[in-house]
Amino acid sequence: MATQDFLVELGTEELPPKALKSLSDAFTQGIVNGLADAGIDHGAVESFAAPRRLAVRIRDLADAQPDKPVEKRGPAVKAAFDDAGNPTRALNGFATSLGVTPDQLDTLETDKGAWVVYRTVEQGKPTIELLPALIEKSLAALPIPKRMRWGAYRTEFVRPVHWLVLLYGNKVIDAPILNLTPGNQTRGHRFHCPKSLLIPTPNDYEVVLKEEGRVLANFEERRDVIRAGVAAIAKNEGNGRAVINDDLLDEVTALNEWPVPLLGRFEERFLEVPAEALISSMEEHQKYFHVVDDNDRMLPLFITVANLESKDPAQVVSGNEKVIRPRLSDAAFFYETDRKTRLEDRVEQLKPIVFQEKLGSLYDKSVRVAALARKIADAIGSDPALAERAAMLAKTDLVTEMVLEFTDLQGIMGQYYAEHDGEPADVAKALNEQYMPRYAGDDLPTTLTGCAVALADRIDSLVGLFGINQPPSGTRDPFGLRRASLGVLRIIIERALPLDLQTCCEWAAENFTVLSEQKVATTVVDYMLERFRAHYDEQGIGAEVYLAVHARRPTRPLDFDRRIKAVEAFRQLPEAQALAAANKRVSNILTKQGGDSIGESVDTSLLQDGAEQALADAVAKQADAVLPLFEQGDYGSALSSLAGLRQPVDTFFEEVMVMAEDDAVRNNRLALLNRLRNLFLRVADISLLPTAS
């Protein structure tokens, strides 16, 4: 089948920079999925994304769908012909619906009888006829929260569209999309080349734009150019190092078609302001990269990326320096002003700020969190007084001028201001660490005081909101309770804290007077334990391992984690599947015979067969060996030891009839099996693990 390269480019007004990459990826994937659904073969797929364009090039695209054999089954042969062998109404109707005559039909023999069938070959449609609809479908499915209209058109898109390139080989596909007539002309840089450019073939696309249009259409190429340019210009300035935040780099890449890095300066006096405030001002508002020295100390330099090659770059730099100076002046003013008021004197300012209508103000929350943090600190061997103090000050930086202006600095400025006030080091650090981890993979609190406040803050929110029946629902989670739950689990596990979720949630519930939900602590614990599933799934641990441990509902996260690791290791052992199957069999037997009413006291005088005597002896020896391990939380060693029960268990089920006629013998065997299963249940319900087929 003949093939040609294909190119589609949609020219627009400047696209949202933070959304450009996701729009490009979705546009490309939508077209690829459409081709796959249509059964059209193709080669490599390349995406292009710049501020004013989305484009996709597909190499070696087949010129048509492959022909497809079609088989349609009609009535049974018995119903298709009468006794004289003539076609019945059923057969004639089937043939007419297909536009054929009965003699053009075949028969199909099956084990259920013979059927009339129609066989033909459906010719594949030309690719150029299918592409416009595929592209329109992909554009319609783009992740655009709010579409806009422009001019007198009813067409909707994320930004107004102005031109469309649709090339198959050197041929323009003449099919309008978004009210645009396709062509083979693109547009260059808005200032360097404000004219149309001819694209002879898809293969010429990025070359024409780069050499004639002064546009780097490939997103990754532009990003690499910016990264290298920014790094080089910083190194040339006293061997500095540009700090390149990947998210900022992507945003700057999406803002520029022809990027030119330029170095600017600001006054050294601004370095007295905390670096985080300067960085926030430069990155968030101006999209500048900052520069540090060999000791990671900030230098009075910044790097901006211009979207053109200026004839007088010094003027561009000067303009940017004039823009950044008042912003840094504001930051310096806020910092100086804020330090005139101690954080403890700001506590009263939290009273008018509502945390949640039914749960009170930020002041009310601070009081609750302080009480809970004190108990948690005591439980983990930290200083309760420091945790209580930190919790009362934790939200006070929210009413400072700096945080009101730069909201992403909450906690960070709290630490600076607390240090300035002379607060204990742990208290100051806790004001920042209360928000850790801020996102998946983020750092955890380094101090126990920080751990206590971070846990107390999250648990207070969870218990309070569940207690007034406002848990997360679907994708709606305005208070970030899912993230809060994972944060609690990570802190407790990775900092190895001996905390019980049930106890912590009960402590939290005691601080509320407005909770309407009964047993809210248990509900919250169940919710948090359910978060473990995704936590371990990300680590490649199967759901069956999680379910086996969750069945025992251990409420100490550190203990839960140790069990998970032990069961995952046990699952790899050659004995695991057989023992899981045996446990499943034992569980079914015990459930049918009374369940919890069955004890585990075994009378050795009632053991008749050698196999049950061997199993009883093995279980007794294992109990002596593993019970101390369970007490130490060494579940891995315990399960490894219990794996030795496989042979006596297998032999028992092969040679012994559990349901003996003698009641005493039967009950004794049930007790033996119950004792066996209870050993495993000290870790997890391994009957939920996969078993040998």
Image (cartoon, rainbow, N blue to C red):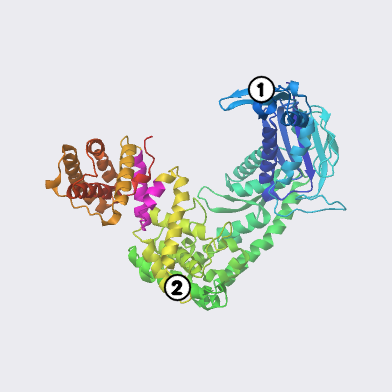
Quickly name the residue at label 1: 107
Query: Looking at the picture, how far across and down is residue 375, in whole percent?
Result: 36, 69
Quickly name the residue at label 2: 368
Point out the tag, 1 or 2, that comes first from the N-terminus: 1
Q: Is residue 585 magenta?
A: no
- In the picture provided, is 5 more to the left or to the right than 279? right
Tell me the crowding category of disc 1: few under 14, some 14 to 19, or many 20 or more residues within 10 angstroms, Cα based. Answer: some
- Which segment did they paint magenta? 545-571
Query: Looking at the picture, how far across and down is residue 334, in whole percent?
Result: 61, 68
Q: Is residue 69 visible?
A: no
Q: Is residue 554 magenta?
A: yes
Kind of residue sitting beneath label 2: Arg
Q: Which is nearer the eye, 460 or 648?
A: 648
- In the picture provided, is 508 more to the left or to the right than 667? right
Regarding mark 2 in the picture, which secondary structure is present there? helix
**Quarter of the figure with the N terminus:** top right
